[in-house]
Amino acid sequence: MSYQLKLKHLIAGDWVGGSDSFESSPSSGPKHSFPGGTDRLVDQAVQAAEQAFTSYCQTTRAERAQFLRAIAEEIEVLGDAITVIAGEETGLPAARLEGERGRTCGQLRMFADVLDKGDYLDCRHDKALPDRAPLPRPDLRLMQLPVGPVAVFGASNFPLAFSTAGGDTASALAAGCPVVVKAHQAHPGTSDLVAQAIARAIDRTSMPRGVFSMVHGGSRVVGEALVQHPLISAVGFTGSLVGGRALFDLCAQRPKPIPFFGELGSVNPMFMLPGAVLERGEEIGRGWAVSLTMGAGQFCTNPGIIVVIEGEPAESLINAAKDALADAAPQTMLTDGIAAAYQEGQSRISGTSGVRSVLTTMCDQRQATPYVYETDGATWLADESLGHEVFGPLGLIVKVSDFEQMLEVAKHLEGQLTCTLHTSDADADYGRALMPILTRKAGRVLANAYPTGVEVCDAMVHGGPYPASTNFGATSVGSMAIRRFLRPVCFQDIPENLLPNDLR
């Protein structure tokens, strides 16, 4: 079956055009004209979501699980069509996109499984104690309930898994919350096809049409109108620190502030302990090169900094990484804007006093090649800008004088999505000293691995202290992501026939 782009917004089951438009900027293939979003369209979508919430929040877990599985099936039916359009828009290879499509469908099915189990409801019951002295206790029951309509912002670097039907959308729909998606301008065609799949799943499972809407961007008006709409109850966002912080501030400034679950930025530092460097430094260096350049460095978990104690073993690690990176082929970056920001970040790092080039390459427009720089621990500690993310395959090696300075670097880190230890049996004492610091700084701590990529499973945390995310108690990946869109409600002495089914 072939699918055609609608080239419109999806507002509660209706495909709607507009007078203003913007053109897509694909890395290859034809450009397409999409209607720009407006605050009026945002209002229509949110009003429809609020109307749908009344019935959708009362659907059974089994009904919502069926809905999520239907979305996954409809995305799978898109097949090559979605691979082609996503490849044209982003420049990502077909194998990567097919894998991401599988992950997207896997996330939807995982949340369907979460619904089947029901554990996420956290149901509790304290039975009445009418004869308790000096005061009786009422019958008290607790469960988690959906918060209301949720706004979701698609991400530039994952056109499927973090976008229209990605983890934020899947977890919100699982919780019982209608969703309004702001499609990302980097891949509007991909968003268009996925929205069609969701619309078909809505019809298949007889869900209220307002349970999902998608509004294209074109200007900042759409995003601002969405997070400020009084009927939006929470926001899921994956993107830049600057853009995310602006939206976060708008959420906080509302007459009724709402939670903003933003995944923003991280340099994902790796700490090379001396025993590991001595035993397998060259292997680690080559592994870092692969992780650094995966997907042109456009992963949220890209390991942009390594920290290593200076000396001959460190030089062996660095030289192995340099040799591996020197052969790295140019890769297409997701957008012209991301490519320009990469070059600006590279210029900032290279122009910083005390920073030396290890590997310099030449980038051509959207074609990214790796850069590697090194500095000493004192310089890094004195200049906080060296700890800021450069989105792309750029690595900074921080050569510290000793382990005590390594600890100081760890203590001065901003919040991170990940921190990694490369360690050996001989490094146990060093590792024990670092672990309390790293667990305070990051949502995920790894040993003897590379952080690029995120497994979708129950135990995963994809979040961390600010600026990695705006809510250190939440995750955007894994089954716990559903908690973001729920709130606890206590039922006191409520007759059983009025209780939610899961509390009876």
Image (cartoon, rainbow, N blue to C red):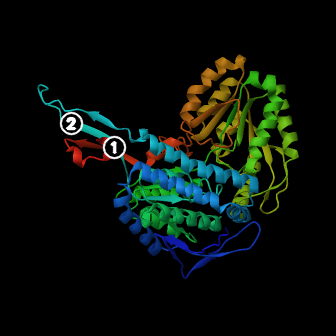
Residue 212 locus on image (x, y percent):
47, 63
Q: Which mark is residue 139?
A: 2
**Mark toward the start of the polypeptide (1 vs 2):** 2
Q: Which mark is residue 249?
A: none
Q: Which residue is at the front of the view, 433 or 499?
A: 499
Of the two numbered discs 1 and 2 in the rendering, the one whose residue sits closer to the viewer: 1
Q: Residue furthest bottom?
A: 19
Amino acid at pointer 1: Asp
Decide which of 67, 469 is in the foreground and name it: 67
The residue shown at (84%, 44%) is 325
Label placed on residue 502: 1
Name the residue rendered at 39%, 68% in the picture: 47
**The image quarter in which residue 280 lies:** top right
Number of numbered discs overlaid on the protein picture: 2
Instruction: Tell me the amino acid under the disc marked 2.
Output: Asp
Question: For this view, does 419 lie left or right of residue 37?
Answer: right
Q: Is residue 133 left or right of residue 110?
A: left
Q: Quadrant of residue 359?
A: top right
Q: How crowded is the residue under tag 2: few (<14 C-alpha within 10 Å), some, or many (20+)?
A: some
Q: Secondary structure at mark 1?
A: helix
Q: Secondary structure at mark 2?
A: loop
Real-space Cα separation, disc 1 to disc 2, in angstroms: 16 Å
